[in-house]
Image: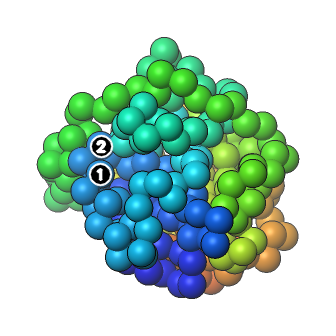
Amino acid sequence: MQLAHSLHRIGNDIVAVHLVDSPDGVTIIDAGFAGQWTELLAELDAMGRSLDDVRGVVLTHGDSDHIGFAERLRRDHGVPVFVHEADAARAKGEESTKPEWGRMRLGATTRFLWYALRKDGLRTTPLAEVVAVRDGDVLDLPGAPEIISLPGHSPGSIAIHVPSVDAVFVGDGLTTRHVLTGTEGPQPAPFTDDPAEAIASLQRISGLGATWVIPGHGAPWRGGVEQAIAAVERAAAASGS
């Protein structure tokens, strides 16, 4: 679906993937689950694009629900996959962590697990190769995405600022729909390695002025960066995290 001019999304509020459409091609932000491949093809077709127009995939971090079809794009179509150097091993399946699940509600957790099962979330193929990025890099990709380190959810979590679409993509730096409880609105994301660091890291995107704050899970937030950060901090304080 089209969110705004040159800004598209596939998936839903459980797991979403985003596309930046520019005259020089398409940049994909995250790669969801492997089973979202057909949705990717359909969205590209609706945009008047094809896989040949995809210039790169930028991962907000290396977790399995963000790398789904990335290796397929890289291996079969020669699309480079960019990830922060601190999450390269995670994206390649060489290391992982198992943070606590925390609060859960049966209905929301069941929907998340069922969606993951239907979208081949249990059959994720790790990346064989990645292009490592660092804080401050501006990538030579459509939209000129800027990398902003956002550690906490994982060591190499990043925000991706794309001024041409007035958006900052934050992955699991925050969420607007908690996949385990169903609670909506800006809040800390579950499965986070270091919750306190994740909240503190949000100050790194403060002042960007972007209208869109787009997480990997939940509805895109159009209320601005500062308001999103403040909402996450309130939610964290209320939950004691």
Q: Is residue 35 left or right of residue 184?
A: left
Q: Secondary structure at mark 2?
A: helix
Question: Do the residues under discs 2 and 1 have CB atoms within 8 angstroms?
Answer: yes
Q: Is residue 157 left or right of residue 65?
A: right
Q: Secondary structure at mark 1?
A: helix
- Point out residue 64 in the picture as x, y percentages from the top left corner: 39, 36
Mark carried by residue 37: 1
How far apart are the two marked residues, 2 and 1, measured between alpha carbons? 6 Å
Going 24% across and 31% down the picture, which residue do you hit?
123
Going 34% across and 59% down the picture, which residue do you hit?
40
In this figure, which residue is indicated by the disc labeled 2? 34
Asked if residue 14 is positioned above or below residue 154 in the image, the reply reads below
Label 1 environment density (alpha carbons within 10 Å; few <14, some 14–19, many ≥20): some
Q: Is residue 149 left or right of residue 198?
A: right
In the rendered view, how is the structure colored? rainbow
Going 68% across and 54% down the picture, which residue do you hit?
141
- Point out residue 139 in the picture as x, y percentages from the top left corner: 75, 49
The quarter of the picture where the N terminus appears is bottom left
- Point out residue 98 in the picture as x, y percentages from the top left corner: 42, 26
Total numbered labels placed on residues in the image:
2
- Point out residue 164 in the picture as x, y percentages from the top left corner: 72, 74
Q: Mark 2 is on which residue type?
A: Ala
Going 75% across and 51% down the picture, which residue do you hit?
140
Q: Could you tell me if residue 42 is visible in this image?
A: yes
Give the camera-side residue of 118 and 21: 21
Q: Mark 1 is on which residue type?
A: Trp
Label 2 environment density (alpha carbons within 10 Å; few <14, some 14–19, many ≥20): many
